[in-house]
Image (cartoon, rainbow, N blue to C red):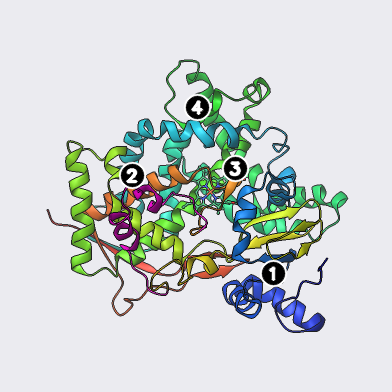
């Protein structure tokens, strides 16, 4: 048994604390340092939430096959988000994850597309604040979070809830508060956590602030759903909702708030990165991507429906290349070991460890990707062309051990098809109606903002949207 796993960073307590702080503010370089130093062998990454064992890429398969008996994901989600305090006891019956997201939502995407498109068409000029002007300059990430909050909720809860600004404001805030609050709660002993949570959430909001604003919108869906014609994700969810959550819609609101939390920021991050990249496109690249979008819509009789979106291969490729470059987390697919576990190189990981994998080691591997250090927006659409019958392997939403954006195995992101659809509907609409450019003198990709192993686009960076002349 080898259990002495080395640690990245300087020696001694000072080295430990300094590296843990770097994992908050400079996570990408600490993780890169560890991956380089230990060259595929596991190493310990100190974080403010405790030690994390970063496994080499040869363990992706181990996590893919995992059934939670040894490498457990729900337990890790509990630690990361303090789910029992912030979302209640849904671990015992996660019906909103299992039934709806894994099959029913994906099947319903076709019928949700017209509403997503209608909302995008109305919300884009309103959220940008165009108000009749030809051109506006906006802080891009915040603008996209607000846009995605509204468009996502057109599918999630429908009208009029998706335009309720008070609800959207609290819902958007939830994603940023949940993780920080969970990390803060982790510093207290178990028995104190509920009290601390109650006090702190009085000041910073969180789930408790979203639920009362969301519940009335769900109540009207409950009344509507008695007719058998689901028009929103909530309507589909209601088919699987136990009676106790129907009579207490606050309980249902917690589930919907949780789905929204997983859905809005992730999609907004991708839309933001995509627009930052599109603003750097050459005129020839821009023509290529626009021509493909127009052709896809024309083939569907001028309607941007789900089939049309499915034919926007260059847009799909751009998103996939963004995911290769910016995989959300410096380390992801995080699990807790429920017993001692032997990994690919024979190392024994002790029971109770948190393990994770650094996606960039895979995404930047020259054995997998040609010139991995180059950002090539059409990398995957070119790979698709030469795939000889295996084209779908290169789709943005395809899962593979060569591409870890959406994780792997049983817990791979179940919302990825919904995410891809809404992001593409929004981007196609923007590309066909606006030119995007950087404010003068800033024509370079803004650096992301790492925080707590997670990297968001720079919130201060701006983009100019100019209406296209037809
Ligand atoms: C581009 C957008 C998105 C990205 C990059 C993304 C990424 C991820 C990743 C990396 C995981 C963890 C996978 C693992 O541990 O193996 C995950 C899990 C999850 N995602 Fe997403 N996600 C996105 C959009 C969405 C959307 C739109 C929804 C909801 C509608 C969603 C719902 C979830 C849920 C519920 C889980 C937990 C699954 C489980 O534990 O079984 N995600 N996502």
Q: Which of marks 4 and 1 is in front?
A: 1
Give the residue at the far left of this rendering.
470
- The residue that mark 2 highlights is 120
Task: Looking at the image, tell me whether mark 4 or mark 3 is earlier in sequence order.
Answer: 4
Which secondary structure class fits the magenta region best? loop
Image x and y of residue 414, in percent = 53, 42
- Give the residue drawn at x 70%, y 80%: 9
Q: Nearer the viewer, mark 4 or mark 3?
A: 4
Residue 42 disc label: 1
User: Mark 3 touching mark 2, by CB under 8 A?
Assistant: no
- The residue that mark 4 highlights is 236
- Give the residue drawn at x 81%, y 83%: 12
The kind of secondary structure element at disc 2 is: helix
Q: Does residue 295 appear left or right of residue 441 in this picture? A: left
Image quadrant where residue 163 sits: top left
Image x and y of residue 211, in percent = 61, 38
Query: Marks 4 and 3, Cα distance to the nearest angstrom?
Result: 16 Å
Query: Marks 3 and 1, Cα distance to the nearest angstrom?
Result: 32 Å
Provide the residue span drawn in magenta.
373-401
Q: Does the magenta stretch include residue 181?
A: no
């Amino acid at each position: 048994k080898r259990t002495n796993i080395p640690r990245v960073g300087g020696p001694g307590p000072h080295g430990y604390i300094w590296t843990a702080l770097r994992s908050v503010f400079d996570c990408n370089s600490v993780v890169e340092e560890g991956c380089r130093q230990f060259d595929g062998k596991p190493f310990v990454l100190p974080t403010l939430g405790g030690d994390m064992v970063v496994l080499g890429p040869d363990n992706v398969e181990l996590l893919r096959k995992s059934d939670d008996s040894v490498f457990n994901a729900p337990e890790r989600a509990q630690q990361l988000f303090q789910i029992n305090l912030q979302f209640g006891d849904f671990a015992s019956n996660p019906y909103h994850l299992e039934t709806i997201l894994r099959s029913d939502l994906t099947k319903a995407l076709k019928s949700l597309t017209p509403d997503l498109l209608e909302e995008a068409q109305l919300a884009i000029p309103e959220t940008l604040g165009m108000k009749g002007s030809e051109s506006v300059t906006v802080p891009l990430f915040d603008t996209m979070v607000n846009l995605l909050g509204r468009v996502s909720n057109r599918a999630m809860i429908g009208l009029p809830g998706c335009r309720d600004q008070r609800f959207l404001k609290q819902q958007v805030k939830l994603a940023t508060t949940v993780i920080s609050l969970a990390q803060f709660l982790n510093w207290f002993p178990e028995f104190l956590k509920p009290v601390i949570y109650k006090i702190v959430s009085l000041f910073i909001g969180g789930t408790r602030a979203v639920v009362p604003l969301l519940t009335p919108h769900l109540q009207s869906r409950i009344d509507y759903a008695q007719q058998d014609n689901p028009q929103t994700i909530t309507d589909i969810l209601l088919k699987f909702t136990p009676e106790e959550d129907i009579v207490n819609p606050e309980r249902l609101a917690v589930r919907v708030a949780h789905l929204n939390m997983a859905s809005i920021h992730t999609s907004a991050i991708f839309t933001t990165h995509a627009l930052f990249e599109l603003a750097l496109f050459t005129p020839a690249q821009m023509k290529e991507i626009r021509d493909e979008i127009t052709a896809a819509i024309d083939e569907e009789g001028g309607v941007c429906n789900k089939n049309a979106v499915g034919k926007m291969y260059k847009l799909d490729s751009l998103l996939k290349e963004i995911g290769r470059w910016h995989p959300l987390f410096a380390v992801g697919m995080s699990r807790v070991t429920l017993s001692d576990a032997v990994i690919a190189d024979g190392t024994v990981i002790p029971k109770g460890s948190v393990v994770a994998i650094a996606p960039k080691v895979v995404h930047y591997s020259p054995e997998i990707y040609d010139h991995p250090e180059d950002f090539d927006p059409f990398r995957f659409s070119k790979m698709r062309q030469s795939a000889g019958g295996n084209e779908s392997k290169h789709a943005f939403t395809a899962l593979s051990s060569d591409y870890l954006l959406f994780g792997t195995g049983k817990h791979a992101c179940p919302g990825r098809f919904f995410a891809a659809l809404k992001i593409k509907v929004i981007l196609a609409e923007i590309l066909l109606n606006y030119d995007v450019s950087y404010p003068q003198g800033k024509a370079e990709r803004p650096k992301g903002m790492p925080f707590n192993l997670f990297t968001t686009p720079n919130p201060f960076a701006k983009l100019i949207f100019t209406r296209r002349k037809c």
